[in-house]
Image (spheres, rainbow, N blue to C red):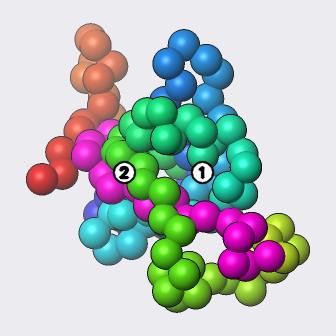
Amino acid sequence: MSRRLLLSVGAALALAACAGRAAAPAPAPAPEPDFTVWFATNPLTRKVDEIRRDPRVVLYWFDPGVEGYVTLRGRARLVDDAAEKRRRWKPEWEAFYPDRERGYLLVAVTPERMEIVSPRRGITGDAVTWRPPTLRFP
């Protein structure tokens, strides 16, 4: 159910943990069946530096139509393996990463915890603390 909710929301961002600094957001795609999320980035971005310093990230999907959201907290891993990059390459990335060999990295986020709020689906936080329902991954 929660993966279906993630696939139905309109906007998503990935935010790297940033020890006292503003996070560097990036678009976050839909998760795989095991909730791992893969996305591409320029290896020269601050996001890459931040992930190297602290791999904790938060992915955030928001559905403004129903005021629902999902956050996925996990650990990011930078992947520069040529075979994996070829396997995950998307033609729509060509304009952003014309140098496929050195011009982009993959980021794989392994989930640790997911929080969900979807009033339309009857999923709401605690009435007093507003703490959302949480799913912990093994």
Residue 122: within the magenta? Answer: yes
Above or below for 121 versus 106: above
| Residue 118 in view of the camera | no
Q: Which residue is found at the position 62% from the left and 82% from the top?
A: 89
Relative depth, front residue between 135 and 96: 96
Above or below for 63 versus 92: above
Pointer 1 local density, CA inside 10 Å: few below 14, some 14–19, many at least 20: many
Pointer 2 local density, CA inside 10 Å: few below 14, some 14–19, many at least 20: few
Image quarter (top left, top right, bottom left or bottom right) of the N terminus: bottom left
Residue 102: within the magenta? Answer: yes
Whole-percent x and y of residue 55? 41, 40
Q: Is residue 74 left or right of residue 66?
A: left
Residue 23 numbered tag:
none
Amino acid type assigned to the residue bearing label 2 in the image: Arg
At mark 2, the secondary structure is helix
Q: Which residue is found at the position 72% from the left and 45% from the top?
A: 45
In this picture, which residue range is highlighted in magenta? 99-123
Amino acid type assigned to the residue bearing label 1 in the image: Ala
- Residue under label 1: 12
Residue 34 quadrant: bottom left
Relative depth, front residue between 90 and 124: 90
Q: For the residues marked 1 and 2, what is the alpha-carbon distance in whole angstroms?
A: 19 Å
Furthest residue toward front = 102
Furthest residue toward left = 138
- Residue under label 2: 121
